[in-house]
Image (cartoon, rainbow, N blue to C red):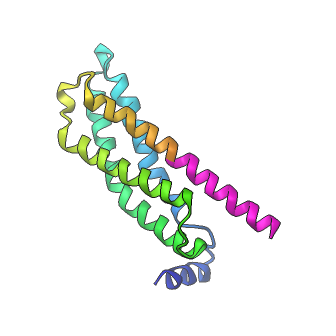
Amino acid sequence: MTEIIFEFLNKIGFTHPLHPAFTHIPMGMVIGAVTFRLVSFLPKLKGLARTGYHCIILGLLGMFPTAYAGYLDWQHTYEGVWGGLIIIKIALAVALTVILAAIAIMDDPENRRFDKKTFFYVLTFLLVIGLGFSGGELTQKLLHAAVNG
């Protein structure tokens, strides 16, 4: 099925990997969520906690198509070969999804406090940094292999 998808995309002129286009959804939402959560501790901006929470929900929803696109690219580009960076990316993505879901269930943005929920927001930010870095490393290795044949 993976090859059918990529063959169709090639026929319409889309020759790029799918996953990078989707990563902007959860990564951007997480960065927004953390920013809004932290800014909401300023007295006149407490309403932004709700915006941060909404970013968490959208980021969580965006995880599923992003992970699926990553799976398709992994199958197509790397032929499903397990490597250290792939394992790291999967572990970080699972951890991010679990923590986003935990925040979605536990957080009450109307009563925000510096507590474990705020720590979870910051932790999501660290996870997206790890995901971005490992994705960049994976891409760099692929480019290096393509250049050096």
Predominant secondary structure, magenta span:
helix
Residue 91 in the image, given as x and y percentages of width and height: 42, 54
The reply, left or right, for residue 11 in relation to residue 96 is right
Image-based side of 58 in relation to 12, left or right: left
Q: Position of residue 6 (x, y in %)?
A: 55, 79
Outermost top residue: 43
Q: Which residues are magenta?
A: 131-149
Where residue 146 sits: x, y (%)?
Answer: 76, 67
Q: Indicate whether residue 18 is drawn in magenta.
A: no
Q: At 51% from the left edge and 85% from the top edge, which residue is drawn?
A: 4
* Residue 31 or residue 102, whichever sits in front: 102
* Left or right: 38, with 76 as reference point: left
Residue 65, by quadrant, is bottom left
Q: Residue at x 51, y 62 (%)?
A: 19
Front one among 81 and 56: 81
Residue 93 on image: x %, y %: 41, 53
**Residue 134 in the image: above or below residue 83:** above
Considering every residue shown, the one lying at the far right of the view is 148
Residue pictured at 43% horizontal, 37% vertical:
125
Residue drawn at x 31%, y 19% is 41
- Which quarter shows the C terminus? bottom right
Q: In the figure, 121 relative to 58: above or below?
A: above
